[in-house]
């Protein structure tokens, strides 16, 4: 019998009384949960193994779940499972609010860590984030399972967002009726006699009048929103494995390994260079011991050999942001200590295998043919050509007049402190959250912060620039003493500029993971929005010598920028 038919057959009766006291084994209590899901298709955990209990404290979790409708799943660890309620409007610290809570099937303990996407068409299909988590203790009972069965649970909660005492009270069922669980997802929130409970917060020290969960939309685990997780889910679950092994990272491009044979060949080449086989191509590289980046204090300078090694390693990660786009190169053939220049025309001596694009919009005195870095070796070629910065167009070659990003450039002035810049970035974060716009943020590697908003093709550059300007000027009104709208830097009197003018054809911002021409070879590194709270964050914190450790630890938080499905909302 198919999972769908099996679920339909199960709607007549439950084989497990979900409100029975906790003498039932967790496996038996999860029978309903398992019948509702096809674990060959959904990444959710099946509850086949034991989840870690940490110091023995009871866990609670709230997952923000966008299925057929948005709701919050409130879960309390009780006797080996997660007793669960779907709360359509979300839990609140406001003691005057009464929230509907729909009692749903118990979930396995390892579900407390689940953040990802449940496939469309499956039970509860949609995106899930860990909105809050922590520990809890039952109040005025030593048998919370019996308290649930009796229809009233008092819980003292210690989370990152939720604090204080919550009360769950089952509404009155019809005489002689047992509580029925709603079938399917939260669409059935009013189905079944006695399915509804009320969730409320007590008047205690943690209570906050008017507290709205929708004003706090980010995961406490990854710092991402549901939109960002949907655009780039980074975990899948394998239900046929033990819980400790169930989570697997979604495959994303990995940097070239540090011990790759190609890098060993580069290390052995003489100072004058030679032929280097890398990423399936043969490149002629030269002047390998030439210093390209001056040293930072206490460090050695960065040679061309080390820069090429970096380009080769990072290229598989960067190319998805470059492929199909014209590439503007900022060249420093004499190194970052000398003056650089923009180079856009692909030279005649370039290898024939390089990707290229002939611009049909170009006038006779403008660049005719651009490099298109559709493969890792092309980026290494550009690095050997002296390009210390890589700037892809925001439109693709098949539609050069249609931007795929709306760009925000937070450009600090001489008087702008780092703390002030971070504060302005937080204002942008709040604006995007209220507009429900998915955005990706990165530090520039110099002094600034940049934000890329991926969009579906459609609006013109003029329309995109106008939208960015509206958002920027609205934010600027909140900090008028910190922001100048003057074009000339000398007229800004040291204040920051929220630069919306980069939203034009053939205007660019530096690519993620591109180096910048400064001592130590700093890198423009993507961050999560939650990292704005990191006191150690700096715009030039990472260099070509440290960024791979970060990638190994955190992965690439910019991947959502590759999903171009957003329509910019009206902003008036």
Image: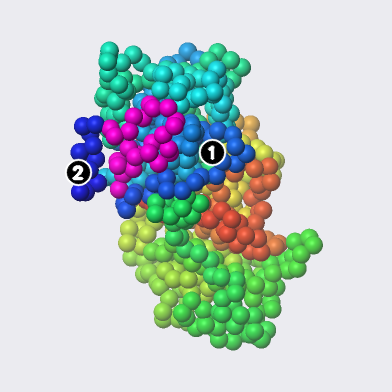
Reply above or below: 208 against 523: above
Q: Residue at x 36, y 62 (%)?
A: 397
Image position, residue 54 (x, y; %):
60, 41
Q: Residue 373's quadrant in the figure?
A: bottom left
| Callout 2 crowding tier (Cα within 10 Å): few <14, some 14–19, many ≥20 | few
Q: Which range is magenta?
A: 14-38
- Do callouts 2 and 1 mark residues in contact (Cβ within 8 Å)? no
Q: Nearer the viewer, residue 141 or 311?
A: 141
Q: Nearer the viewer, residue 325 or 245?
A: 245
Reply above or below: 443 against 429: below
Reply above or below: 468 against 286: above
| Callout 1 crowding tier (Cα within 10 Å): few <14, some 14–19, many ≥20 | some
Mark 1 lies on a secondary structure that is: loop
Image position, residue 51 (x, y; %):
51, 45
Q: Residue at x 56, y 26 (%)?
A: 137
- Answer left or right for 412 relative to 69: right
Q: Is residue 432 magenta?
A: no
Image position, residue 332 (x, y; %):
62, 69
Image position, residue 112 (x, y; %):
48, 40
Q: Is residue 31 magenta?
A: yes
- Measured in 3D between alpha carbons, the distance from the residue under mark 2 to the one under mark 1, in whole angstroms, is 37 Å
Mark 2 lies on a secondary structure that is: helix
Query: Does residue 204 show up?
Result: yes
Q: Which residue is mark 2?
A: 5
Q: Which residue is mark 1?
A: 220
Q: Nearer the viewer, residue 66 or 20?
A: 20
Query: Does residue 558 show up?
Result: no
Q: Earlier in the sequence, mark 2 or mark 1?
A: 2
Q: Residue at x 36, y 15 (%)?
A: 171
């Amino acid at each position: 019998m198919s999972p769908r038919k099996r679920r339909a057959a199960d709607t007549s009766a439950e084989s497990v009384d979900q409100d029975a006291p906790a003498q039932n084994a967790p496996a038996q209590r999860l029978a309903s949960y398992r019948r509702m899901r096809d674990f060959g298709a959904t990444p959710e955990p099946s509850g086949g193994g034991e989840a870690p209990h940490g110091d023995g404290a009871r866990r609670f979790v709230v997952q923000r779940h966008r299925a057929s409708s948005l709701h919050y799943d409130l879960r309390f660890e009780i006797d080996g499972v997660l007793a669960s309620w779907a709360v359509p409007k979300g839990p609140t610290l406001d003691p005057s609010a009464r929230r509907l809570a729909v009692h749903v099937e118990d979930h396995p303990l390892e579900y407390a860590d689940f953040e990802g996407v449940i496939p469309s068409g499956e039970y509860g299909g949609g995106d899930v984030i860990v909105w809050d988590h922590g520990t809890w203790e039952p109040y005025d009972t030593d048998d919370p399972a019996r308290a649930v069965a009796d229809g009233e649970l008092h819980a003292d909660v210690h989370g990152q967002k939720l604090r204080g005492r919550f009360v769950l009270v089952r509404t009155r069922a019809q005489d002689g009726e047992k509580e029925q669980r709603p079938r399917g997802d939260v669409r059935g929130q009013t189905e079944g006699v006695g399915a509804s409970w009320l969730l409320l917060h007590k008047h205690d020290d943690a209570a906050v009048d008017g507290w709205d969960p929708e004003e706090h939309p980010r995961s406490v685990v990854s710092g991402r929103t549901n939109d960002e997780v949907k655009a780039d889910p980074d975990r899948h679950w394998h239900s046929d494995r033990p819980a400790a092994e169930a989570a697997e990272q979604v495959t994303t491009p990995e940097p070239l390994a540090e011990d790759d044979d190609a890098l060993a060949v580069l290390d052995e080449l003489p100072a004058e260079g030679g032929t280097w086989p890398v990423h399936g191509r043969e490149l002629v590289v030269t002047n390998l011991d030439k210093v390209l980046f001056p040293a930072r204090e206490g460090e050695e300078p960065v040679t061309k050999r080390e820069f090429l090694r970096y380009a080769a390693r990072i290229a598989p990660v960067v190319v998805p942001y470059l492929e199909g786009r014209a590439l503007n190169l900022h060249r420093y053939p004499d190194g970052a200590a000398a003056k650089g220049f923009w180079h856009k025309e692909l030279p005649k001596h370039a290898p024939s295998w390089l990707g290229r694009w002939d611009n049909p919009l170009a006038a006779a005195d403008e660049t005719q043919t651009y490099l298109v870095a559709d493969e890792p070796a092309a980026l290494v070629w550009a690095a050997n050509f002296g390009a210390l910065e890589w700037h892809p167009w925001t439109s693709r070659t098949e539609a050069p007049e249609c931007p795929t990003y709306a760009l925000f450039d937070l450009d600090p002035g001489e008087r702008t402190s780092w703390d002030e810049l971070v504060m302005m970035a937080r204002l942008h974060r709040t604006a995007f959250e209220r507009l429900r716009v998915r955005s990706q943020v990165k530090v520039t590697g110099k002094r600034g912060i940049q934000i890329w908003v991926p969009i579906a093709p459609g609006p013109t550059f003029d329309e995109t620039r106008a939208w960015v300007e509206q958002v920027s000027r609205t934010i600027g009104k909140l900090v008028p003493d910190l922001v100048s709208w003057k074009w000339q830097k000398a007229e800004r009197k040291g204040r920051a500029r929220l630069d919306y003018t980069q939203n034009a054809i053939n205007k660019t911002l530096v690519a993620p993971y591109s180096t910048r021409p400064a001592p130590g070879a700093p890198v423009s590194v993507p961050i999560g929005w939650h990292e704005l709270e990191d006191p150690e964050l700096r715009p030039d914190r990472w260099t070509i010598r440290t960024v791979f450790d970060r990638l190994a630890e955190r992965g690439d938080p910019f991947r959502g920028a590759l999903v171009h499905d957003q329509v910019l909302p009206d902003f008036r």
